[in-house]
Image: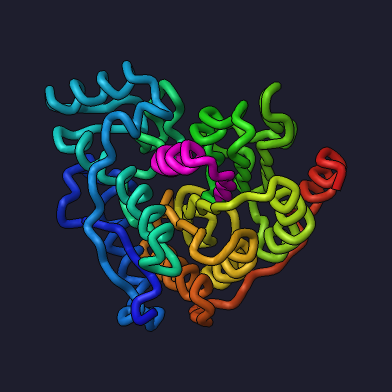
């Protein structure tokens, strides 16, 4: 395939206008996408303008009253939803397009139009709960796509390597046996959820894996966690699709957190994770990441690894902080 990577993004149509100084702005998209040519992937990528997710698709994972409140809020001028989260007049349509990007990514892979699909859109989504927008997020983009897949009878693993716990994704699928949610995140940190002992609801026991790592944790510990905890848990679940909630704010340069990953670490993670499901069944969806250089390098390294290339602008990181979490997780999950 001449262009094995499909990228679903429309920065030029982005109307989710950030307040001055807000870290979550359209500049994040520019930074992330700039990593593609730097990784030598320009000729391997097909850029696609994503569609808008329908209200029906969104309300499969969100309370219809939340969706309607957000629509009216944006139409009447928007403003701050909470101390972190805002909406502008054009935010509702932009959020529909962000969810549509992940849906389009799924469809492109299912049709055999690409080998890897990257939904590079904003606002991010993994903090958006069933009935609450929060944490920079309006709609839960990966949840919308995962529900579309489970409605077709697929089994979906969502692996979230954003530095913040994806409380929204956990909230939506906590009692759903058709979705495995895995989160590696810094703890303590916003939003304060994601304990190791949160393992799923009564109808879906051991369908929710949280790995809350201490500040300072580096790539070696994440690699060990993937090999010794995540891989066996995913194998037990036996997914047919994988969606990566790819926040790049666990990078050591990110201003909002204190994990110590590098872009080479993300390449290692992507290389491991792609082996969990059949070919053409890996969707990458942009979540957080607030340092431009880290976003650029990490995006390029991740996509490069997913197509079997070796772009590593930084060395991988190593250290021992965080290893007790792996031991505790293995005991809890009986691995």
Asked where in the image residue 228 lies, by quadrant, the reply is: bottom right
- Name the side, left or right, on which 120 lies relative to 147: left
Colour convention? rainbow
Pick the residue in front: 276 or 291. Answer: 276
- Name the side, left or right, on which 326 lies relative to 51: right
- Measured as percent of width and height from the top left, residue 329 is found at 79, 44
Residue at left 71%, top 65%? 220
- Measured as percent of width and height from the top left, residue 59 is found at 36, 27
Say if the magenta span includes residue 151.
yes
Residue at left 32%, top 66%? 33
Q: Is residue 241 above or below residue 164?
A: below
- Name the side, left or right, on which 120 lies relative to 196: left
- Measured as percent of width and height from the top left, residue 216 is found at 65, 55
Residue at left 26%, top 39%? 96
Pick the residue in front: 52 or 15. Answer: 52
Q: How many marks?
A: 0
Residue 186 visible somewhere in the drawing? no
Q: Start and end of the magenta stretch?
A: 141-160
Residue at left 46%, top 35%? 127
- Measured as percent of width and height from the top left, residue 198 is found at 69, 30
Residue 268 visible somewhere in the drawing? yes
Q: Is residue 212 above or below residue 248?
A: above
Pick the residue in front: 258 or 179. Answer: 179
Say if the magenta span includes residue 74.
no
Quadrant for the N terminus, please. Answer: bottom left
Residue lying furthest top: 65
């Amino acid at each position: 395939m001449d262009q094995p990577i499909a990228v679903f993004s429309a920065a030029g149509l982005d109307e989710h206008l950030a307040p001055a100084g807000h870290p979550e702005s359209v500049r994040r998209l520019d930074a992330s996408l700039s990593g593609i040519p730097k990784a030598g992937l320009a000729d391997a990528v097909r850029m696609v303008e994503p569609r808008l997710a329908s209200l029906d698709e969104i309300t499969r994972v969100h309370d219809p009253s939340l969706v309607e409140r957000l629509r009216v809020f944006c139409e009447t001028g928007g403003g701050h939803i909470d101390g972190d989260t805002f909406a502008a007049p054009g935010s509702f349509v932009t959020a529909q397009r962000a969810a549509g990007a992940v849906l389009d990514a799924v469809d492109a892979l299912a049709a055999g139009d690409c080998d890897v699909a990257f939904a590079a859109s904003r606002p991010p989504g993994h903090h958006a709960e069933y009935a609450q927008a929060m944490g920079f997020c309006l709609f839960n983009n990966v949840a919308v796509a995962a529900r579309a897949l489970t409605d077709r009878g697929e089994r979906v693993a969502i692996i979230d390597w954003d530095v913040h716990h994806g409380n929204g994704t956990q909230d939506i699928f906590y009692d759903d046996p058709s979705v495995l949610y895995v989160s590696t995140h810094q703890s303590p940190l916003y939003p304060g959820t994601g304990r190791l002992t949160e393992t799923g609801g009564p109808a879906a026991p051991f369908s929710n894996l949280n790995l809350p790592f201490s500040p300072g944790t580096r790539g070696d510990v994440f690699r060990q966690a993937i090999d010794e905890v995540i891989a066996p848990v995913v194998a037990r679940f036996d997914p047919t699709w994988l969606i990566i909630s790819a926040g790049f704010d666990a990078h050591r340069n990110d201003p909002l957190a204190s994990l110590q990953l590098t872009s080479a670490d993300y390449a290692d993670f992507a290389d491991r994770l792609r082996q969990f499901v059949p070919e053409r069944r890996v969707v990458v969806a942009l979540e957080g990441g607030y340092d431009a250089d880290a976003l650029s390098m990490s995006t390029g390294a991740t996509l490069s690894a997913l197509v079997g290339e070796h772009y590593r602008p930084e060395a991988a990181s190593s250290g021992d902080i965080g290893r007790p979490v792996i031991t505790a997780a293995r005991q809890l999950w009986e691995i």
